[in-house]
Amino acid sequence: MQQLDQILKIEGEKGVQLYRKSLTDNNRVVSGQTSQSIKYTVKNTNTLVFTGDDHITSLEDGRKPSESSGGRGFFEQIEQWVLDRGLPIKAAYPIYRKINKEGYKGTEGLLSVPSEEIVENTKEAIGESILNNIRVSFKTFKNK
């Protein structure tokens, strides 16, 4: 039987690709930094964990209007986004103000759809591994 941690590593690799594909398919890749930030780890040989840039969930969930400025880091992200889009740097501040004032709508299903697919794929891979183990056990039993 294939070990659980091996299955999770395989599904983790596939999952990273599914998330990255979703970002690309939904036109959410400018510099590629967020896409490349998506990683996976297998913890305690039985837990698959995906991580990415702090703001990645905002791409799906959106962002509510905010009375606070969102901090200097948020403005710097907007500046980088503007530069990556080939826009003049002076466009950053009006965009920053508008997002703080009005928020923005996220992209429905951007992360949740690949997440559901990852869960199903992982469940199938683990189930198939268990079934193969049972088949081997029956063959061994029959041969004794």
Image: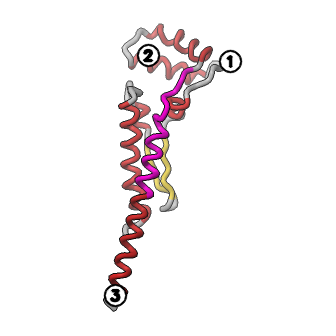
Marked residue nearer the N-terminal end (1 or 2): 1
Separation of residues labelled 3 and 2 (CA atoms): 67 Å
Label 1 Cα crowd, 10 Å radius (few <14 / some 14-19 / many 20+): few
Looking at the rendered structure, the number of numbered marks drawn on it comes to 3
Q: Label 2 sits on what residue type?
A: Val
Q: Which residue is mark 2?
A: 82
- Taking the spot 47% from the left edge, 38% from the top edge, the residue there is 111
* Residue 142: image tag: 3
- The residue range painted magenta reads 104-123
Q: Which residue is mark 1?
A: 67
Q: Is residue 142 above or below residue 87?
A: below
Marked residue nearer the N-terminal end (3 or 2): 2
- Taking the spot 34% from the left edge, 84% from the top edge, the residue there is 140
Residue 119 place in picture, x, y as percent: 46, 51
Residue 69 place in picture, x, y as percent: 63, 18
Q: Label 3 sits on what residue type?
A: Lys
Image quadrant containing the C terminus: bottom left
Query: For residue 69: magenta?
Result: no
Asked if the residues shown at circle 1 and circle 2 are in contact, with their CB atoms under 8 angstroms apart, the answer is no
Looking at the picture, tell me which residue is in the foreground, 73 or 9: 9
Label 3 Cα crowd, 10 Å radius (few <14 / some 14-19 / many 20+): few
- When asked about the image quadrant of residue 83, the answer is top left
Q: Label 1 sits on what residue type?
A: Glu
Image quadrant containing the N terminus: bottom left
Q: Is residue 114 above or below residue 76?
A: below
Asked if the residues shown at circle 1 and circle 3 are in contact, with their CB atoms under 8 angstroms apart, the answer is no
- Taking the spot 48% from the left edge, 17% from the top edge, the residue there is 79
